[in-house]
Image (cartoon, grey):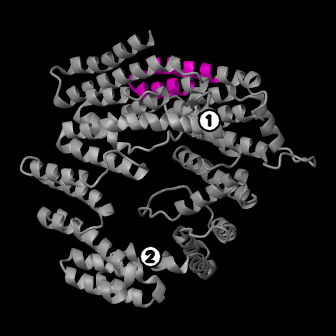
Amino acid sequence: MVRKALAFSLFLSFAVPAAAQGTPSTNTAVNADKLAKKSELIEQILSDAPGFRLGENRSYTFARAGAAICKTDIKTAQSLFQRSINDLQNAQMLVDTEDKSGAGRLEWQINRIARPNILTVIGGCDAEFALDSLFRTRTMSIQNAIAQSSEPSSKIDDPNRANSQVAQTELNLEQRLTRLAADQNPELALKLLQDSIKKGLSPETLNSLRKLFEKDPESANSLATDAMSRLLSANFSSDTDDRGEVNLANAILNDQMRVRKPGTKDLKFDDSQLRSLASKYIAFSIGELSRRPGTNFTSLVRIAEKFAPGSVAALKKLERERTPASLRNVMPNSDTRRVMESNMTAPQILAEARRMPADSRGPLYQNAANKMASSGDLDGAMALLHANFTGRALDNAVNSLNWWYAGVLMNQGKFSEAEALIDQFPESNRRTALMNLAAKAYAKDKVGNKEYAIGVLNKARTLMPDRPVDQTTLGQFVQLTIAFAEVDTDEAFNTFQPVIGQINELSDANAVVSGFQGTGVVRNGEFILPANPNFGFQLEPNLLRTLAKADFDRTVKLLDGLTRREVRTHFKFQLVELGLN
């Protein structure tokens, strides 16, 4: 019944304005075609949904289907949302009967993973319903966790601080849904946002404050001051339940780094509070970074330069100590990155390089060489690299310059010269470069360069195995398929069709292994869709968009070849949400 109503309502939502306008325009016809295709896919997904063994999978599918059609058919969407919540509540009720010896694992999967994702999906369309459903699906265990986390106790508690984590997750979710509800219903926005911000701090607090500022600047600024006071007295630690305050501090400080147009009215934080928060955040981060090598210090240094200049030297010293000597001439540090992000000329970059330690100049030499090549001085760029690099570092630098210069030639329309240069690349780089070359040449002249582009792509195909042997080569098959789809539809589908069988093998094998290992993404032999599981492989999202644009029916048929219902549903949703927009 829902499927028939869905098809009719999608047609009606388009047909009425079309009739009022008379003869449909080209854009109108395109939109009608997209609606028809979306309707077809949603119907297929909904027909598959009852076959899921897991209630959370049915719930997630109904929620996502409703979200996909809510702009064109809110009534049917709301019906699907209600079915979603019914299935979620049924799944919660099964916890007590199924989780006899799972030490709370099933409850954790449903309430900590599935429920927040399902409610967030619904909230994107009907946040008031999602917010109401949040309270209706707030189980006794969640309520107890919230109560216990707010009451200090001298008794020994869970060493993992599970109650605090549950409470913080619930607060984050409530504030996210409240902000969405305020977006969707301006009449309720003021009270919803004020109440939400007063309840507690979460990464959503900044967005809520900014949304409140649009309605009531004075109230927002007052609550911002209060939120900062609470943040300054909060406990910053690496514990999971303290990460909300740490992430909020990071969000506020980085938000204050934004360049604003003169005269722009925006949420106001007290300068002294910002400086105190920056000092606290930097002190915490220094303690964390000393235990986590290889971290990007650039954002932290920028915060220090604006709000805590006295910390800059210590941060740069720590950055140097944390970066292995072997990587200092490869990884840009905060100083070299600032130069590279500027509009300096090659001579200016080289002048800056001479002021820096010798073992951190590499990225600047590479950047200067690229700029020299772009201006036509390839010989000078090569001479610069040979004068400053040696051994494997020189090989890497030259390969990087050649890649850059090949791109310069492509942009200039010198495709044969670019191909000759690409032929000298290491094989691992040559495949991707040839695909880029074919795409550039075809985009330049879709008639005159079509045969040339096909020839280049066939050359790339000869550098690949008969079938993917790992994730890297699977990615190459995907990229080749995308490249062919722009030029030759048949070759695109011929390239990817044999991969479907391998994907089925991988997903079946991963379901068995993940279920056996208890990773939390498979239960009763079924991938848990709200957990955003890894099916054992990854596909570039642009693949389905490109294939559907070339031939929608063949793309759907390709997806029908996926034997696991979870995998099939996941990629059909991806096609609905990305491929038809």
Q: Quadrant of the N terminus?
A: top left
Q: Quadrant of residue 371?
A: bottom left
Q: Nearer the viewer, residue 194 or 510?
A: 510
Main SS class of the magenta portion in the image: helix
Tell me if 69 is positioned left or right of 552 in this view.
Answer: right
Q: Looking at the picture, does residue 287 appear above or below residue 317?
A: above
Residue drawn at x 58%, y 21% as measured from the top left: 53
As drawn, the residue found furthest toward the top would be 1
Residue 30 in the figure: left or right of residue 338? left
| Residue type for callout 1 | Gly
The residue positioned 15% from the left and 55% from the top of the image is 441
Pick out the residue farthest to the left: 448
Task: Determine the residue positioned at 31% across, 26% down.
Answer: 557
* Residue placed furthest toward the right: 154
Label drawn at residue 515: 1
The mark nearer the N terminus, 1 or 2, is 2
- The spot of residue 490 in percent (x, y) is 19, 36
Q: Which residue is mark 2?
A: 330
The reply to whether the magenta stretch includes residue 85 is: yes
User: On screen, 366 above or below 213?
Assistant: below
The front one of 37 and 431 is 431
Q: Amino acid at mark 2?
A: Val
Q: CA separation, marks 1 and 2?
A: 41 Å
- Image location of residue 207, percent across then percent down: 56, 48
- Location of residue 467 by image quarter: top left
110 sits to left or right of 430: right
**Helix, strand or loop for disc 1:** helix
Circle nearer the viewer, 1 or 2: 1
Q: 328 or 464: which is nearer to us?
A: 464
Q: Could you say which disc has been placed on residue 565 in the image?
A: none
Part of the protein shown in magenta: 59-88
Q: Position of residue 535 (x, y in %)?
A: 50, 39
